Image (cartoon, grey):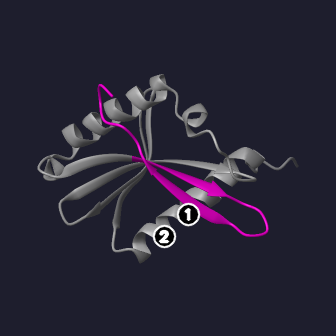
């Protein structure tokens, strides 16, 4: 009899580890994770977190080592998709409509000394 177990790609497992690390870090800093892997057609938000009246839409990138060029990780098309995804999230969750929305990039570097670097992404039209 053949097994029907699904094997996750190593890259997908790495992404899951990175998102879990960022979720834990945000929780330790008082944020409530309100959504993970919010997907609608071509739109995807890795993490959505809230604290006070601030809503963070977070793109998580996990790499084996530190990366210097952030713009290679978030090209203009991806940034635009993140903003569209945030609008879709707010449309589906009107309880957050009066929150200030920020996009952020969390870069997780795995390795001997795992770390999380944070960058606030520019708003629409920047």
Total numbered labels placed on residues in the image = 2
Check the image and name the residue furthest to the front: 68
* Residue appearing at x 30%, y 47% in the figure: 102
Magenta highlight on residue 119: yes
The reply, left or right, for residue 65 in relation to residue 17 is: right
Considering only vertical position in the picture, is 57 above or below 39?
below
For residue 10: magenta? Answer: no
Image spot of residue 24 (x, y percent): 49, 70
**Where residue 2 sits in the image (x, y, percent)?**
86, 47
Q: Quadrant of the C terminus?
A: top left
Question: Which residue sits at x=18%, y=51%?
Answer: 96
Q: Horizontally, is 61 left or right of 34 in the view?
A: right
Q: Is residue 72 above or below residue 6?
A: above
Q: CA distance from mark 2 to mark 1?
A: 9 Å
Above or below, comparing residue 84 to residue 93 in the picture: above
Q: Which mark is residue 20?
A: 1
Q: Nearer the viewer, mark 2 or mark 1?
A: 2
Q: Is residue 45 left or right of residue 90?
A: right
Q: How many C-alpha atoms fall within 10 Å of the one at disc 1: few (<14), some, or many (≥20)?
A: some
Residue 78 visible from this viewpoint? yes
Q: Secondary structure at mark 1?
A: helix
* Magenta span of residues: 104-126
- Residue lying farthest left? 98
**Residue 19 falls in image quadrant:** bottom right
Foreground pick, 108 / 9 = 108
Q: Left or right? Give the position of 99 relative to 82.
A: left
Which residue position holds label 2? Answer: 25
Residue 7 visible (yes or no): no
Task: Report the disc number at residue 54.
Answer: none
> What x and y, as percent, mark residue 51?
26, 65
Q: Residue at x 41, y 48 (%)?
A: 104
**Foreground pick, 91 / 69:** 69
């Amino acid at each position: 009899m053949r097994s029907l177990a699904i094997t996750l790609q190593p890259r997908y497992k790495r992404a899951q580890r990175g998102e879990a690390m960022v979720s834990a870090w945000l929780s330790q800093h008082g944020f409530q994770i309100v959504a993970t892997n919010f997907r609608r057609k071509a739109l995807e938000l890795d993490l959505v977190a809230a604290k006070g009246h601030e809503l963070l839409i977070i793109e998580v990138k996990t790499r084996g080592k530190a990366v210097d060029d952030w713009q290679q990780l978030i090209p203009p098309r991806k940034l635009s998709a993140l903003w569209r995804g945030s609008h879709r999230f707010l449309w589906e969750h009107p309880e957050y409509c009066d929150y200030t929305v920020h996009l952020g990039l969390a870069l997780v570097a795995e390795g001997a000394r795992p770390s999380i670097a944070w960058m606030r992404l520019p708003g629409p039209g920047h």
